[in-house]
Image: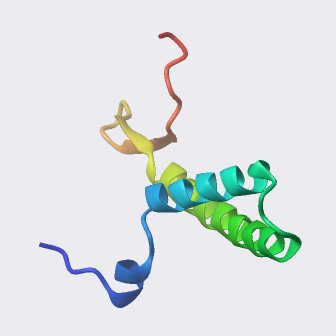
């Protein structure tokens, strides 16, 4: 089993960050938060958006399809989802 380093153990999962961001948006949209709370929530939300974007960009870079060339070498291509559904 792979061990996680201390930073990985403390980092919330992408899904947890997204869930927190959704709660922040709900609270801000409700209009029930005061100015100070709204500013704090907005700042926290902005940080969560940056963190989520970073996770998605990293995942996008990892998603690659390996295809074999005619000479037997492997070529890495960016992942392109099928347009047909």
- Residue 67: quadrant of the picture: top left
Q: Is residue 1 left or right of residue 55?
A: left
**Residue 77 rendering spot, x and y as whole percentages:** 49, 40
- Residue at far bottom of view: 6
Q: Is residue 5 left or right of residue 21?
A: left
- Rendering coords of residue 39 (x, y %): 83, 72
Q: Position of residue 56 (x, y in %)?
A: 55, 54
Residue in the image at 11% along x and 72% along y: 1
Camera-side residue of 53 and 26? 26
- Eyeballing the image, is 19 above or below 12? above
Number of labels in the image equals 0
- The relative height of residue 84 versus residue 44 in the rendered view (above or below) is above
Q: Nearer the viewer, residue 12 or 23?
A: 23
Q: Residue at x 53, y 62 (%)?
A: 17
Q: Which sits in the foreground, 33 or 58?
A: 33
Residue located 81% across and 54% down the image: 31
């Amino acid at each position: 089993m792979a061990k996680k380093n201390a930073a990985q153990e403390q980092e919330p999962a992408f899904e947890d960050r997204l869930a927190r961001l959704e709660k922040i948006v709900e609270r801000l949209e409700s209009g029930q938060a005061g100015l100070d709370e709204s500013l704090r929530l907005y700042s926290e939300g902005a940080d969560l958006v940056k963190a989520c974007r970073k996770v998605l960009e990293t995942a996008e870079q990892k998603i690659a399809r390996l295809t074999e060339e005619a000479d037997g070498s492997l070529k890495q291509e960016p992942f392109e989802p099928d347009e047909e559904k």
